[in-house]
Every structure is written in structure tokens, then in C-alpha cells.
Image (tube, coloured by chain):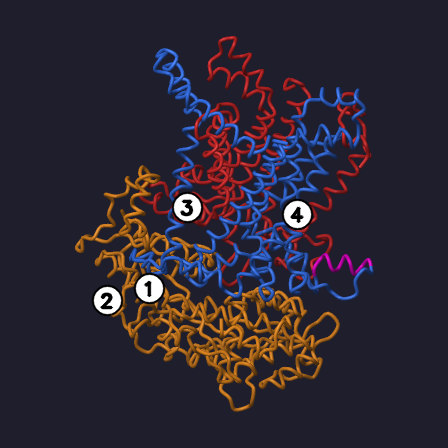
């Protein structure tokens, strides 16, 4: 690692056309994403052949894609709605809590923080089993709000911890100054804290999205019909007790990744924009 | 500041507040304002506390109770489960498989965290450089997280297959190996292979959060530091690392907590085999509950895992609090 | 409160009151309804045929039976591995479906909980079913579930590869070892089977164990040791890839399809995939026995249909009609043909074998096939775990077959 990587003055007088680094990043990306390539390759193999897969899909077979497009479209939309809903709910609950835990000297804050940490140690199946009964009684089974609430069980505690960790880096003088100016807690929160924490909110939001997107357990436990079915569960249409249709499984996974990756790239752009504008510092 | 540091000052603070409240009757108006202020502060926390109680409190308590019962499939239907005290704990802790699972869990967690964190941090620092396509490439690194685990574990099983897997074919073409390496079917390699796949899954998490943490460090610090001669390694040691500490704490603590309970990846890749060489406490607890239907024992073992997690968290937080104090 | 957990434990109730009150209270008044005379118009069904083409085959049969009973269907299909946890959740919240499909080795486990109704309550006929099928569906002398069609496993062989090597399909263990060794060449293995650490690995081992007189109640016997020795030798000789330790039956089939294995142990559900590759000529024989003259005993596979105790007699009666209808001669024959499985009534077997020669070996085997839970009932899962634990220990070389079985049995 060169000296420059350690420090960041490069930020200011950056050499914007540093393609050497880009090449290095692409090389690493190629290694990291080889399994993703292999998934795409497998999705194009005839009959979902899983043995002796050729390095390149020279005779691509699109049967899996046709099946996936025909059957998984609505599930994809469901997944997106639930994941975005979970991001909104998680941030709405986590951001104020993180702020309170980072700045207020509330009695019991330590306990709350520790409880949140403990919650992350609980196996998902334990939560899912308990939720089924409650959801059944409340009529929340097979509903999008029900799944948003449940999927946020991954996102909320995580987002609180992450946002709080980042907020610790915020100079409290800024908030104090705002208060001196007569801003109440709410105004200080919305007009100072939120904009300043933009990066951490996006990072937390990103992972909340990914948690909800990849959830299988809650989707499986809390649905009993095909009415509301996220794509992770939809994929199981091709995994049977006896035989599997791997080309459809892989094709669905490929198709489902596309809208999600677009969202992620957009979110990252947003982070970059926020940083370079310098508003934060 | 780490989680620990935060746990302690707030407690200390509340202790300081205590006497203030006691004296309050002398100054009623101040007391009122103080109360209103505190109420207001709590409002920020209330939604989160309520949510946590509903979605975690109840399941946890239920699981703890279950671990002290002879909880079988019949219990689900009849609701009857005799109390057996600590019998379930005795059974699972004295099982010959427990020590194997414990060791595997430790190796799996340490290996995964070391790999994920070191590679994640190195990449996060690397991506601080400005170069074309930086943002897009960084986002694409999150792709592994978009794949359902059933898909990534199936793909990895094909890649790691002894006879026709891509990895062995690649190594064979380079003449590094002569016969297929039994990545997933050798008792000495399977755990390494599973750790490798888990590192692959964990890198995006570490990279993204550490990157975010690095972005938060004000440039002014580096500028000031460079005037004092802190550049390169020194800048990292005296500016980057201390400033990144809170984020590092969260990444490590959450990383360990998440890794300890990893289930699907191991089940998908090896199912705990061959010959239990990748059996961890999490997979063992799952097997007890959902394959052998010994729910009481499964819950007990699950709770043992939570306690291990807890002990780690407390020790880590203590240690870093001490580091802060010094 | 409806949850099993809150029903009779004061501490639990107290805690629920503290943390779960708002969520749970809402449901207290709800009841699953128990009026016996209501007019049943809809029946709920849960099964694990979640992928095509089985999903539609079973769906069609269910729909026609529902139409016959004058009701409509509300069907839920869940991934195979999650069926049991789903059943348990539903049984604790008293939301079990009216008709429930279970994999046959799970039946006794669920019947033991009291969640299922004996089919005799509804006068469902159990005549003429193969003994193995009935034993799988029986718990404490009462039949709780019936399987319209069943399956088992046998030895598939690639006709072209065997002919080229001048090998005839093996009938004894010695022949199997010799054939597998001869057929192993380059990147082609003589045989593929599944010895993974799941119940599937146990299932594939049972034909050897049972045909040789081994017994699941005690696996630490010479008979079972001999059987495990065979599996171990095949892997040690290199006639079977050590990947068998991690393969599923689906993987085994992929190996066979790709020509990487000349023979394989598998079931008739692979036939559609095999037929898709017209260049592949394959035959099916019984899994070899140790000595000529021993009877091949195969394990019984397949799913049974049950009527859960939902507390509503009228609905249960309708559900029983559907279970009965699924098991009618006509449905058994058509489902067996469509799904490459075997009708479970012995009187149908002969006609079926004649009409479906590719399934003849399986039809033959099913007549005497043995249910996994026949002896141990709900004790089967624990013993099945011991069996695959021993297989894994022996095949990885961590212990000799004898020691592996002894250790596993002692656990």
C-alpha cells in the first residue's frame, strides 16, 4: 500500500484520470464477482447443466429467463416494495433513536443500547416462529405491511448501531450552536442532524435494503398464499423436494439483481455527491 | 468512542442527573422544564424501544423458557411441556459433539472476521482514492449481497466441486494441482472452504461501512497532521485509526455476532459435514430443533450461543473502554 | 391466548403481558370455529409440491377431488425443507389446513402430537394398500395418512457405457464392486450415490443395510457393518467420487446425465430429466444384494395425505372425502403415470407395471418396500441421524465402518 492510500490530501488535488487504480479495482472486482459470473453462466446453460459447465456460455439457452420473466415479475415488484418500505420504516425509527443515544444523556440509554446489541444475537428462526402466532391473530399474514414490519427486525437495530457510531463523529458543538440559536430538539434534529448524517443514513439504508431484499425466513413464515411473495421465496418454485430447475433459479437471481443493483449504484452516487459537496465538513 | 465508552458515560451521566432531580423540588420551574426536556428526549427513543420489545423481547423470552422444558413436536399442538430444569443444558453441553461444534464455531468466526475485516479495510482505504468509475465499482462489490443464499451456496458448491468445479479446473489448467482438491469433502479442508465463502460474503459489509467511516473523517485533520509531519503510515496510525474507532467497534462487534449465528451458508455448502467437520453451534442447534425435533435442547444450545456472543461483546466493550480510559 | 406457549405457564403469560400484549391480545377472541353443521364450501390444503410439473399434477388431482366433494380449494405449497416448521407453527396457532400432506417418515412424528385425526373416524378405506405404505401411515395401530403413490430407489445404469466395457448390470455386492471398478476410467466414475449428512444420505444406505439383514434399532451389528464396508470400499477404491459425501440425489443425477458416472442410485422422479436427453440409454435394476438369493428390501418413499384435527367436524369430513378421493384407483393410476411413481394399492401394481415398463423394477420393489418409521416410529429421526453420522465417519476415513457404527449407536 502506498503512502497515498493512507492519507487523503489526494482528495483535494486529485488526479481525476487515474486509470491505474481503476484497473486495480476492476481486477479485484473480477475476483470478487466470479461467482456472480458463474451464476450468469449457469443460467444460460442448456437444461441447467451443473456439471462440466463451459467457461463461456457459447450456446446460450434462454429457457430459464423466459420462465423467470413469465413467473417472477410480480414477485420482483413485491420485493422492491417491501425492501424500500423497510428502509423507510427502519430509518424513521432508527435515526431519532440513534441521535438520542449519541447525544442525550437519557437514563437507561446504556441498557437500550445493550439490548439492541443482544437482539442481533438472536437467531432469525426464533423471531419468525414467535411472529407467526401474533401475525395470525392480528391478520398481518400475507400482507405487505406485515412483511415490512418483520423485515425491519434486521434493519432497525442494525441501523441504530451504525448511525449512532457515525453520529459520534459529528461535532456536538454544531448542535449546541443550533440550540443556542433557539432551535428546539425537533428542529435541530431535522435541520442539522439529518443533513449532517446523510452518509450514515444512506449506508444504513443500503444495508437495510439488502437485509430486507435477501430475507427468506420471514417471507416463508409469514405468508400462506402466493398473493404476497418476495422473489427470494418465488425462487423456491424451482427448487422442489425431488428435482430442481437450476436454470430458472439462476435466471431469476440474475434478473432480480438488476433493479437492485441500479438502486445501489444510485445510492452510492448520492454518497459521493454528498461528500464532494463538502457540506458535511 | 466505542460502544463501551458510550455505555459508561451515559450511565455516569444519569447518576449525575440523579441528585439534580432530587434537589429539584427547591426549584420547581427548573424541575418542570427538566422533566419536559427528558420526556422529549425519550420520545426519540420510544418507537425503537417499542419495536424492539415487540419483535425481540417476546421471542427471546419464549426461547429461554423453551430451553427449560421438554419441548417436543407435541408441545406445539397441546401446549404441554414439562419443566426439566437445566436438563437440556446438561444434555447439549455434555454431548460429544459440543466440543467439536465449539471449536469449529471459534475457528469459523475468527477466520471469517480476520479475512473480512482486513480485506474490507484495505479496500475501503483503497477506494478513498479518486479514480474513474470508483463509485460504480464500489457499488458492484455489493452484488454478492443481492443473491439469495440458496443461489450463492449452490454456485459455490459447483465452483468448489472436486471433479468438475471451476476452481479445480482453473488450478489444474495452471498446473498448480494434479488431482481435484476435495474442498468440501475433506475433513481438513471443508472448514477452510466454508470460511472462504463466508469471507466472500462479508467483504462488502466491511468495505462499505468502513468506507463510510473513512469518509466522515474531516480533511482538516489530515491537513493539520501533515503540517506536523504525520503522513502515510503515521497519518493512518494517529489520525485515521483513532477517528475510525467507533465504526471499527461496530463493524467488529456486529461482525462477530452475525458470524457466530451463520446458518444458511454452512447448511447450503456442507450441511455440517463431512463427518461434522463444519458443524457449528448454530447448525447443531438448528439440527436439534428442526431435524431431530428436540426443541428444548435446540433452544438450550441456541441460548448457549447467545451467551457466548454476549460474553464476547462484554469483554470486547470492557477492553475498548479501558483503552479509551487510558 | 391461542399460542401453545402462553396457554398454561404463568411466567410466560406474565412476560407476554409485558412485552407482547398489544400484539397478542388482538387475537384472543378469535376462534377457529367449531360448528359442526355449517355448510363447507372451501377446504384448505398444504403440501410441498411447490415446483412444476408436480405442482400442477397434484393440483389437478386435488381440484377434481374438490369438485367431486362440492368444495373449492385453497392450496398452499411450501418448499420441502420448510414444511415441518410450517406445520408446527400452524399447529401452535391452531391454523392447520383441512388437508395436510406429509413426507411419510414425518407422519408418526406429527401424529404423535395429536394434531392428526385417524382416518377410520371418517370411514376412509385402507384396504388393499401395500403393507409398507400402511405401516408408514400408521401410528399406534391407527391409520392417519394414505399415500396415493409411492416411490423407492434402485440402480440406474448407462447402457452404452456398460456395453462398451462388456459389463452386465450387477446383482450382488461383489459384482457391483467389480463393475464399478471396471467402469471407472478417466473422469468417469463407475458409480454415484449420495452419502451426505442428511436423511437423504441415510435413505440411500438403507437398501444395503436392510437387504443384508441389518436393523435400524441397533446399527452396531455385523450385517450393517458389512453394508457400510461396501460403501466405504467403493469410495476408497475410487470407483465412487468422494464428492458423494456432499452430493444430493439431484447432484447424483446430474453426474449420471453428464456421463460422469456409469451407474447411480436414484429414484424414478429423475426419469423425466433422463428422458430429456434422448442420447442417454439407461436401464434400471434392483440395488444389488450381498449374496445371490437375498431379497432386495427397499425403503419406501412418498407422501401421505392426512386430515388434521382442526376442531371442525364438518370440514374434517370433507377433507377426508378428498383424501379418500386422491387414493381412488383412478387417481392412483393417473398420478402414478404422470409423476413416475407407483400406485400404492397392490391390486393396481400388475396392470401398472405392464402399462409402464420403465417403472417395472420400482413396482416390484414397492410390494415389499419397508417404511423408515415402521419400527421406531417417532424415534426414527434420532436414529437416522446416527446412521448418516456413521456413514460420514466411515467414508471420510475418520473411523472404520465397525467403529463408526459403534460410536454412532452409542451416542
Q: How many marks?
A: 4
Mark 1 → mark 4, Cα distance in angstroms? 44 Å
Q: Residue at x 52, y 8 (%)?
A: A181
Mark 2 → mark 3, Cα distance in angstroms? 41 Å
Residue B314 placed where, x, y %?
A: 54, 41
Q: Is residue B168 magenta?
A: yes
Residue C354 visible in the displayed image:
no
Residue A202 placed where, x, y %?
A: 58, 29
Q: Quadrant of residue B101?
A: bottom right
Kindly indicate which chain is depicted in blue in the rendered structure: B
Q: Is residue B246 magenta?
A: no
A11 w.r.t. C318: above or below: above
Mark 4 → mark 2, Cα distance in angstroms? 56 Å
Q: Nearer the viewer, mark 1 or mark 4?
A: 4
Residues beneath discs 1 and 4 located on the same chain:
no
Q: Colour of chain C?
A: orange
Which chain hosts label 3?
B
Residues beneath discs 4 and 2 located on the same chain:
no
Say what secondary structure mark 1 lies in: strand
Amino acid at each position: 500500500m502506498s503512502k497515498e492510500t493512507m492519507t487523503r490530501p489526494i482528495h483535494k488535488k486529485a488526479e481525476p484520470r487515474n486509470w491505474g487504480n481503476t484497473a486495480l479495482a476492476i481486477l479485484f472486482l473480477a475476483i470478487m464477482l466470479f461467482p456472480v459470473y458463474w451464476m450468469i453462466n449457469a443460467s444460460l446453460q442448456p437444461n441447467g447443466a451443473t456439471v462440466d459447465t463451459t467457461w463461456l456460455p457459447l450456446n446460450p439457452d434462454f429457457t430459464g429467463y423466459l420462465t423467470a420473466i413469465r413467473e417472477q415479475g410480480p414477485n420482483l415488484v413485491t420485493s422492491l416494495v417491501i425492501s424500500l418500505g423497510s428502509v423507510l420504516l427502519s430509518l424513521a425509527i432508527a435515526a431519532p433513536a440513534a441521535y438520542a443515544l449519541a447525544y442525550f444523556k437519557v437514563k437507561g440509554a446504556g441498557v437500550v443500547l445493550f439490548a439492541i446489541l443482544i437482539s442481533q444475537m438472536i437467531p432469525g428462526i426464533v423471531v419468525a416462529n414467535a411472529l407467526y402466532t401474533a401475525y395470525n391473530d392480528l391478520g398481518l399474514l400475507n400482507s405487505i405491511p406485515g412483511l415490512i414490519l418483520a423485515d425491519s427486525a434486521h434493519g432497525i437495530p442494525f441501523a441504530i448501531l451504525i448511525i449512532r457510531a457515525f453520529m459520534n463523529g459529528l461535532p456536538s458543538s454544531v448542535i449546541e450552536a443550533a440550540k443556542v440559536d433557539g432551535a428546539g430538539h425537533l428542529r435541530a434534529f431535522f435541520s442539522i442532524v439529518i443533513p449532517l448524517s446523510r452518509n450514515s443514513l444512506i449506508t444504513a439504508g443500503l444495508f437495510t435494503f439488502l437485509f430486507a431484499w435477501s430475507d427468506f425466513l420471514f417471507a416463508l413464515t409469514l405468508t400462506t398464499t402466493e398473493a404476497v411473495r418476495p422473489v427470494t421465496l418465488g425462487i423456491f418454485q424451482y427448487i422442489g423436494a425431488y428435482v430442481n430447475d437450476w436454470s430458472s433459479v439462476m435466471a431469476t437471481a440474475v434478473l432480480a439483481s438488476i433493479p437492485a443493483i441500479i438502486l445501489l449504484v444510485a445510492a452510492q452516487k448520492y454518497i459521493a455527491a454528498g461528500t464532494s459537496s463538502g457540506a458535511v465538513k | 468512542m466505542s460502544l463501551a465508552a458510550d455505555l459508561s458515560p451515559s450511565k455516569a451521566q444519569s447518576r449525575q442527573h440523579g441528585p439534580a432531580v432530587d434537589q429539584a423540588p427547591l426549584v420547581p420551574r427548573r424541575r418542570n422544564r427538566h422533566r419536559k426536556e427528558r420526556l422529549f428526549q425519550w420520545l426519540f427513543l420510544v418507537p425503537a424501544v417499542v419495536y424492539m420489545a415487540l419483535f425481540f423481547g417476546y421471542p427471546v423470552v419464549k426461547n429461554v423458557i423453551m430451553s427449560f422444558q421438554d419441548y417436543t413436536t407435541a408441545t406445539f399442538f397441546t401446549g404441554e411441556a414439562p419443566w426439566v430444569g437445566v436438563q437440556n443444558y446438561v444434555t447439549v453441553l455434555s454431548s460429544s459433539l459440543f466440543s467439536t461444534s465449539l471449536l469449529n464455531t471459534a475457528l469459523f468466526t475468527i477466520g471469517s472476521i480476520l479475512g473480512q475485516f482486513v480485506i474490507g479495510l484495505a479496500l475501503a482505504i483503497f477506494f478513498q482514492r479518486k479514480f474513474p468509475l470508483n463509485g460504480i465499482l464500489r457499488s458492484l462489490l455489493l452484488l454478492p449481497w443481492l443473491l439469495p443464499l440458496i443461489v450463492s451456496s449452490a454456485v459455490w458448491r459447483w465452483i468448489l466441486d472436486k471433479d468438475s468445479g471451476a476452481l479445480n479446473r482453473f488450478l489444474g489448467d495452471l498446473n498448480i494441482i494434479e488431482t481435484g482438491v476435495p474442498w468440501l469433502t475433506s475433513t481438513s479442508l471443508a472448514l477452510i472452504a466454508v470460511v472462504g465463502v463466508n469471507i466472500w460474503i462479508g467483504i462488502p459489509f466491511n468495505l462499505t461501512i468502513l468506507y463510510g467511516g473513512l469518509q466522515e473523517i474531516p480533511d482538516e485533520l489530515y491537513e493539520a497532521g501533515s503540517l506536523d509531519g504525520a503522513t502515510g503510515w503515521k497519518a493512518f496510525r494517529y489520525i485515521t485509526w483513532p477517528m475510525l474507532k467507533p465504526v471499527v467497534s461496530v463493524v467488529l462487534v456486529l461482525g462477530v455476532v452475525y458470524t457466530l449465528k451463520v446458518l444458511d451458508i454452512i447448511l447450503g455448502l456442507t450441511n455440517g459435514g463431512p463427518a461434522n467437520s463444519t458443524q457449528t453451534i448454530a447448525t447443531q442447534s438448528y439440527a436439534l430443533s428442526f431435524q431431530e425435533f428436540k426443541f428444548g435442547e435446540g433452544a438450550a444450545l441456541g441460548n448457549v450461543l447467545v451467551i457466548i456472543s454476549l460474553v464476547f461483546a462484554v469483554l470486547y466493550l470492557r477492553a475498548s473502554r479501558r483503552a479509551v480510559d487510558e | 391466548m391461542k399460542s401453545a406457549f402462553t396457554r398454561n405457564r404463568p411466567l410466560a403469560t406474565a412476560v407476554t403481558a409485558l412485552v407482547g400484549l398489544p400484539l397478542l391480545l388482538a387475537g384472543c377472541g378469535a376462534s377457529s370455529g367449531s360448528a359442526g353443521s355449517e355448510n363447507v364450501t372451501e377446504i384448505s390444503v398444504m403440501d410441498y409440491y411447490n415446483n412444476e410439473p408436480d405442482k400442477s399434477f397434484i393440483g389437478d388431482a386435488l381440484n377434481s377431488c374438490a369438485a367431486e366433494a362440492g368444495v373449492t380449494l385453497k392450496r398452499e405449497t411450501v418448499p420441502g425443507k420448510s414444511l415441518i416448521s410450517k406445520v408446527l407453527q400452524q399447529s401452535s396457532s391452531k391454523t392447520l389446513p383441512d388437508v395436510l400432506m406429509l413426507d411419510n417418515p414425518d407422519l408418526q412424528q406429527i401424529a404423535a402430537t395429536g394434531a392428526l385425526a385417524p382416518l377410520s373416524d371418517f370411514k376412509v378405506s385402507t384396504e388393499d394398500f401395500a403393507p409398507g405404505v400402511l405401516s408408514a401411515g400408521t401410528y399406534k395401530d391407527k391409520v392417519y395418512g394414505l399415500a396415493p403413490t409411492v416411490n423407492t430407489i434402485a440402480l440406474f445404469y448407462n447402457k452404452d457405457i456398460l456395453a462398451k466395457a462388456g459389463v452386465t448390470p450387477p446383482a450382488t455386492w461383489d459384482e457391483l464392486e467389480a463393475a464399478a471398478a471396471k467402469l471407472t476410467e478417466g473422469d468417469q466414475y463407475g458409480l454415484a450415490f449420495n452419502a451426505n449428512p442428511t436423511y437423504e444420505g441415510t435413505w440411500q444406505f438403507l437398501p444395503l443395510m436392510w437387504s443384508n439383514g441389518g436393523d435400524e434399532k441397533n446399527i452396531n451389528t455385523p450385517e450393517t457393518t458389512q453394508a457400510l464396508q461396501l460403501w466405504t470400499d467403493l469410495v476408497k477404491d475410487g470407483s465412487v467420487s468422494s464428492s458423494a459425501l456432499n452430493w444430493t440425489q439431484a447432484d447424483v443425477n446430474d453426474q449420471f446425465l453428464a456421463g460422469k458416472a456409469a451407474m447411480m442410485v436414484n429414484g424414478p422422479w429423475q426419469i423425466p430429466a433422463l428422458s430429456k436427453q434422448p442420447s442417454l440409454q439407461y436401464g434400471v435394476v434392483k440395488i444389488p444384494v450381498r449374496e445371490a438369493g437375498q431379497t432386495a428390501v427397499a425403503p419406501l418413499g412418498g407422501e401421505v395425505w392426512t386430515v388434521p384435527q382442526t376442531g371442525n367436524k364438518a370440514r374434517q369430513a370433507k377433507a377426508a372425502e378428498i383424501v379418500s378421493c386422491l387414493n381412488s384407483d383412478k387417481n392412483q393410476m393417473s398420478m402414478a403415470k404422470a409423476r413416475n411413481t407407483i400406485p400404492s394399492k397392490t391390486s393396481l401394481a400388475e396392470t401398472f407395471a405392464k402399462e409402464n415398463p420403465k417403472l417395472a423394477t420400482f413396482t416390484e420393489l414397492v410390494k415389499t418396500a419397508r417404511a423408515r418409521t415402521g419400527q421406531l416410529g417417532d424415534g426414527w429421526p434420532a436414529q437416522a441421524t446416527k446412521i448418516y453420522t456413521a456413514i460420514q465417519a466411515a467414508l471420510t476415513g475418520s473411523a472404520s465402518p465397525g467403529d463408526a457404527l459403534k460410536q454412532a449407536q452409542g451416542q
